[in-house]
Amino acid sequence: MSAAAMTSPAPLDLPRLDGRTVVVTGGASGIGYFAAEHLAALGASVVIAARNPERAAAAIRSIGDLVPGADVRYQPLDLADLSSVRDAGRQLREGRVDALLANAGVIGYPAWPPTGLPALPATTADGFELHWGTNYLGHFALVATMLPALLESQGRVVLVGSLSHRNVREPADSLPEPATASDLQLYARSKLAVMSLGFTLARRLSAAGSGATSLVAHPGVAMDVLDPVRPGISRNQPTVRVPGLRAAASVVAQGKDGGARSLVTALASPRAANGDYWGPGGLFQLAGRPGVLRPAANALDPEAGERLVRVSEELTGVRLPI
């Protein structure tokens, strides 16, 4: 399909980001891809930090086709390998960085219906439970390593949470026990930790009088089946062929391009403030126009957040420098 036949990124009511460099983890596919596309359309220089160079190259080509003059480059990053995270963080902080969108993540799917996707490993390269080790601990190490550059630029960190955090009963610093939880429960636990980190960092930045900011955002329910056409961009969700699925899904969900809007708004809007939680403002926060929301209390617990940072520093060997 030609570039002309594709739908260009819908304009967002946000200021231009010309001259600013934004790092997007997981920007080669899914919500991260559409966030990178939106940011490039706003004029930002976008760094796609991702594990697969072929997928990243396809994303860069796609954005270049849709956004003339887009400045997009690739940074190797495997969040499931702390040595890769530390290397990427050090390389990224050598140049100017104005914002980090910590979006990437993994999620296991039930065995039925058949997904056709390869089974996920149980642990990261460092032996941590896969969801918590990748979605949370990898991002903790990346944020901590890159933070000096973001403090210097008075930049912004946006950590991507999930509605599923509301279903977690344990405190945010509780380490997961894979033998007693499903993949979806483990995913929710990892996202609660991500959100707790975002709000803890916001409190620390405020206490230090820093001009840098930390926010949390969630995409609502975002489904590949509702995405606009982007040839060559990999889909992260299992393909399920059910008659009428697209029409039914559109009632309670949005495409991943729509899910990316809350993330990009949290990153770029002048109305977005340190400590905010952004997400769709529609029915049950599933889809719709981005707005400031209220997270569950366990994501805001300051004592659990500080305990989480301490255990994360011990596990990664990386200190959060604020």
Image: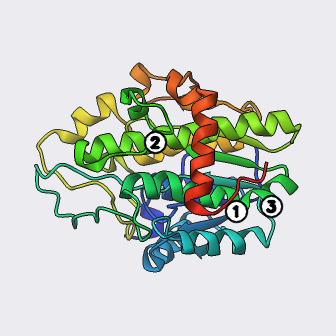
Which color mode does the image show?
A: rainbow
Can residue 179 be seen in the rendering of this structure?
A: yes
Indicate the quadrant containing the N terminus: top left, top right, bottom left or bottom right: bottom left
Residue type, numbered disc 1: Thr
The residue type indicated by label 2 comes to: Lys
Total numbered badges shown on the rendered structure: 3
Secondary structure at badge 2 equals helix
Which residue bears the numbered disc 1?
Answer: 145
Assess whether mark 2 and mark 1 are in contact (beta carbons under 8 angstroms): no
**Type of amino acid at the residue the image marks with label 3:** Ala
Circle 2 sits on which residue? 191
- Residue 78's place in the image compared with 249, above or below, is below
Q: Earlier in the sequence, mark 1 or mark 2?
A: 1
Q: Mark 3 and mark 1: span between their CA atoms?
A: 9 Å
Q: CA distance from mark 1 to mark 2?
A: 20 Å
Q: Nearer the viewer, residue 154 or 9?
A: 154
Residue at disc 3, secondary structure: helix
Q: Report how far apart the C-alphas of labels 2 and 3 lie in the structure.
A: 25 Å
Quarter-of-image position of residue 97: bottom right
Residue nearest the observer in this picture, 264 or 117: 117
Seen at 74% across and 30% down, the residue is 271
Q: Is residue 282 left or right of residue 243?
A: right
Q: In the figure, is residue 9 to the left or right of 184?
A: right
The tag earlier along the polypeptide, 2 or 3, is 3
The residue depicted at 27 percent of the width and 53 percent of the height is 108
Left or right relative to 308: residue 151: right
Q: Mark 2 Cα within 10 Å, few/some/many (few <14, many 20+)?
A: many
**In the picture, residue 84 is in which quadrant?**
bottom right
Residue shown at the point (57%, 52%) measured from the top left: 312
Residue position marked by numbered label 3 in the rendering: 149
